[in-house]
Amino acid sequence: MQVAPLSADNKTVYYHLCVGVQKILLNDCLGKTIRIQFEGDIVCQGCDATTSKSYGQGYCYHCFKTLPQCDLCIVSPEKCHYLDGTCRDSAWGEAFCMTDHIVYLANSSGLKVGITRASQIPTRWIDQGAVQAIPMFRVATRQQSGLIEDSLKAFVADKTNWRTLLQGDAPPLDLVTERNRLLSNTYKIVAKLQALFGIQAIQPIETELVTELCYPVERYPTKIISHNLDKQLLVEGKLEGIKGQYLLLDTGAINIRKYTAYHVSVSIQ
């Protein structure tokens, strides 16, 4: 699922569902019945081989165990081992990890801290279904962002509760105040990291501009039911909303990203 540019108000999110070469503007499909039929094939994003199971959201087992984008440090960036010379693919690591990253605060299912490449803002915030977000730091590498995020976990969550996310928008927060509170709690840790990597490598972002996002949702479910294409070949229901990577149907929710490598047919009426 791709995120289109924000609307003219710079808040409303537009989504495209990509099926092969076709791109469907999902915002225009609210209230319509959508049918997603799993055709039985899963094709690895890494090597194009057919696989019986998807690992790491779209890879065969071999690619999952060998590709750098499937390494443990992707989910635990503070464990990045590029500088140790043991990256699975140093060229990929140079392009993906040794580049500017942003440490941010977001309000998705509540207050959380996160990281992303600087080029992925606001896409990363939208992927998490955040209704508000503000950057905290710009750093030179993925590892540095992970070390800062790890230091903040003692004071703020680093995960989104997907069930809470799909039950409605989180109440608004004063993210500027929350950011300043966290900066005050962690300034000694940040100073140590600046001494280690250099002040220029880790820069606080002092903006007071909070990004606000609105999602195309007509109705949130009162009870969370999760669809699974591994257990049911056909998912069908009236589309009532899109938030983060989820389609909200009147029959349940489905995480579209989870099925990136699946061959499906889609019809909308």
Image: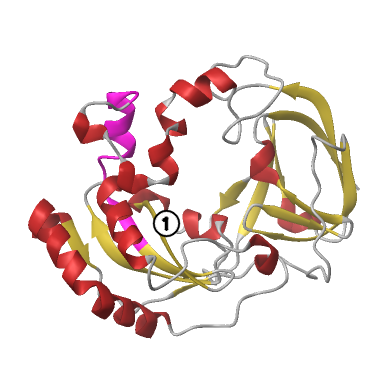
- The residue that appears at 41% across and 80% down in the rendered structure is 175
Closest to the observer, 132 or 82: 82
The reply to whether residue 33 is visible in this rendering is: no
Crowding at label 1, few (<14), some or many (≥20) Cα neighbours within 10 Å?
A: some
Is 196 left, or right, of 42 in this rendering?
Answer: left
- Report the number of discs: 1
In the image, residue 230 above or below residue 88: below
Is residue 257 magenta-colored? no
The reply to whether residue 66 is visible in this rendering is: yes
Colour scheme shown: secondary structure
In the image, residue 26 above or below residue 153: above
Image quadrant containing the N terminus: top right
Is 46 left, or right, of 16 in this rendering?
Answer: left
Residue 168: percent from left, percent from top: 70, 73
Is 51 left, or right, of 232 in this rendering?
Answer: left
- The residue that appears at 33% across and 23% down in the rendered structure is 89
Name the quadrant containing residue 241.
bottom right
- Kind of residue indicated by mark 1: Ile
In the image as oriented, which residue stretches furthest toward the front?
Answer: 154
Judged from the image, the secondary structure of the residue bearing numbered disc 1 is loop
Residue 53: percent from left, percent from top: 69, 26
- The residue that appears at 57% across and 25% down in the rendered structure is 45
Provide the residue designation for mark 1: 121
Q: Which residues are magenta?
A: 88-103
